Amino acid sequence: MIVGQFLNWIDKACVSERADAAHALARAYLRDDVSFEDRCAADAALTMLLDDPSPKVRLAMAEVLALSHRAPQQIIAALAADQSEIAAIVLALSPVLTDADLIDRVASGGVSEQKHIAQRPVVSMSLAAAIAEVGAAEAAIELIENTGATIAALSFRRLAERFGDRCDVREALLADRRLPSDSRHHLLVKVGEVLKESPFVVALIGADRAAKLTRDACVRASVTLIDGTDAAEYGALVEHLRMRGELTTNFVMRTVALGKIDFFGAALVAISGQTVQRVRSLLAGGRDAALTALFRASGLPSYADKAILTALAVWRDVANGKRVAGAQEVTWLMLKTVNAAPGQSGPARECRELASLLKSIHLDELRANARGHALAIAAA
């Protein structure tokens, strides 16, 4: 259709005819064989159609122009600010919109606009950061579930901080393998707080017991979290635990008993101020005197020395293929060092808390191994 004729005809056409014409004109604008003059005329006609009273006309334009990087910028910008049905297509798909344009839309737009932007096939790190900082929870979920989004560790942390109280966002974050370990721990603590404050749980077992059970569960979950954390992230997780006051002697002893020696080393580096190379060398083959000096520099109590040294010796042998053992055997040997194994006279007063912790870990491992054995028999 010749553009001049289109402009004369448009006032007399019905909505469906105008929509069809807008669709055809948009397609014509994007063709390679259109002359410069005709393209300019089509640009002017499309710009005029932005004022059409029917959203169907503008929607017809958006469906064509949103897919092309050659679409006129002023028309795309106007369609992106149109009503939700029209803006959604442009915000979610148009390659003409820059990160700066999209970030402005995230900051000034509503939930619907933010969601469509978060659903784009490719979301840059800076755009993801904007959504994490000011986006609504619904947009955050779309962002997290978008495999085409590049989300920085800092943005994950902001999402966890802002939406840790919302179960739907927590669920999406915890299901994402990219979530940094410190953010994952933050969310685990949030889950514990929710359970602790649950009226049902409090009515069932009482507030004090609910607090203790959730605290113990969070500690166990924190240790389990280490298994899913890259060694390169141990330092960040250690610092996170330190800032929360959760890098306690009991927590460190639990990591040693369960064989998380690389994490134990990262904790010693952070607490003692020794270099990574020095700590790794000592843990791999250092003498007892040098190790105990490291423990003192780290603030670990002297009554725990024998238990830690015993555990390290066993885990070294396991790592070198000289011995087959697990946490059940290691905690048993650690209990013996504090005189708390069955048949022994009992731990000294300063060792009672440590003995209680080791016994708890030992019983947990006994139950886990027995459960695994029973399942293996049932599956045979």
Image: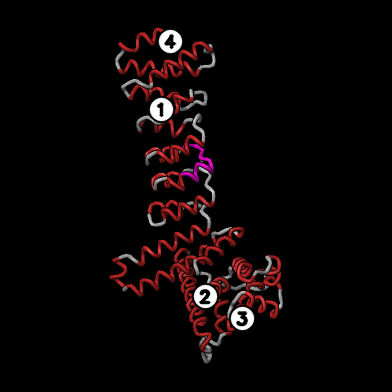
Q: Is residue 124 magenta?
A: yes
Q: Is residue 377 above or below residue 45?
A: below
Q: Residues within 10 Å of mark 2 (few under 14, many from 20)?
A: some
Look at label 3 and name its amino acid.
Asp
Q: Quadrant of the N terminus?
A: top left
Q: Which residue is mark 2?
A: 250
Q: Secondary structure at mark 4?
A: helix
Which residue was labeled with disc 4?
3
Q: Amino acid at mark 2?
A: Asn
Residue 301, given in percent of the width and then of the height, sits at 58, 80
Q: Residues within 10 Å of mark 4 (few under 14, many from 20)?
A: some
Q: Is residue 197 left or right of residue 271?
A: left
Q: Amino acid at mark 4?
A: Val
Identify the mark nearer the N-term, 2 or 1.
1
Please tell me the numbered disc located at residue 87. none
The magenta-colored residue range is: 120-130
> Which mark is in front, 3 or 1?
1
Q: Which residue is labeled 1 in the image?
A: 79
Foreground residue, 47 or 57?
47
Counting residues from the start of the chain, the first of labels 3 and 1 encountered is 1
Q: Position of residue 108 (x, y in %)?
A: 41, 39
Which secondary structure lies at badge 1? Answer: helix
Query: Picture quarter containing residue 267?
Result: bottom right
Is 190 positioned to the left or the right of 350 in the image?
A: left
Q: Residues within 10 Å of mark 1 (few under 14, many from 20)?
A: many
Position of 349 with respect to 23 (left or right) is right
